[in-house]
Amino acid sequence: MKRDINKVDDTIITAKRLIKQKLYSDPDIIEVLNNPNLNPEEPDSYVGKNIFDYIRIPGTITEPTNYICFDIKQNSIAQYNSYVKEMYYIFNVYVHQDNIDTPYGMSRHDLLGYLIRDIFNYSNFMGNQLELKSDTPGIMDEYSSSRSLIFKTNTTNSLNRAVRTNKYEFSDMVEDNNGF
């Protein structure tokens, strides 16, 4: 690849990396995910098992498992300022019915939803304040309950942070691809 993939300058990829890190670094999140097969002293091991940086619906599972899935959506560019875009941070929590109860007197999916709100709502994540726009309960299937949380922020509209040029337009990449 011609691009340095270790230095990707992309809002979504950077935000996903930071969200993942915030989730697995929070000891309360790790405790409430309640995975007896993983060591809470190695919280990054929950990534790919209980924490996913994409929206997914877990398939049929034989043991009670809980999940946090998240993704990011660019909804639109501001109508009166094309340098600004709306970003939505979407979190889905899925909890198996056999694991819904907690020792704290509340349902596990509600508790995970609270913890996500507590971490991200009105935080200045990625330099822009997130604001909770939706917190919706639901069901995934006959065995699992869910909660979906959506946070909104406005941010600059380009890889180059409000510069309206393509950094590859006159580079060697175009020469190689177009024969110039």
Image (spheres, rainbow, N blue to C red):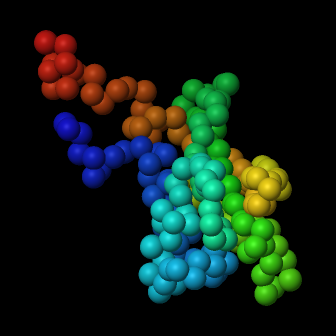
Is residue 153 toward the left or the right of residue 142 in the image? left
- Asked if residue 132 can be seen in this view, the reply is no
Image quadrant where residue 147 sits: bottom right
Q: Residue furthest right?
A: 105
Identified at 59% across, 49% down, the residue is 56
**How many marks on residues?**
0
Image quadrant where residue 159 sits: top left
* Figure quadrant of the N terminus: top left
Question: As displayed, is residue 42 above or below residue 11?
Answer: below
Q: Residue furthest front?
A: 62
Is residue 40 toward the left or the right of residue 119 in the image? left
Identified at 27% across, 52% down, the residue is 6
Identified at 60% across, 40% down, the residue is 73
Q: Position of residue 47 (x, y in %)?
A: 48, 66
Identified at 27% across, 47% down, the residue is 5
Q: Nearer the viewer, residue 153 or 45?
A: 45
Image quadrant where residue 123 sits: bottom right
Q: Position of residue 180 (x, y in %)?
A: 13, 12
Question: As displayed, is residue 111 above or below residue 177?
Answer: below
Is residue 126 toward the left or the right of residue 31 in the image? left
Q: Position of residue 34 (x, y in %)?
A: 63, 79
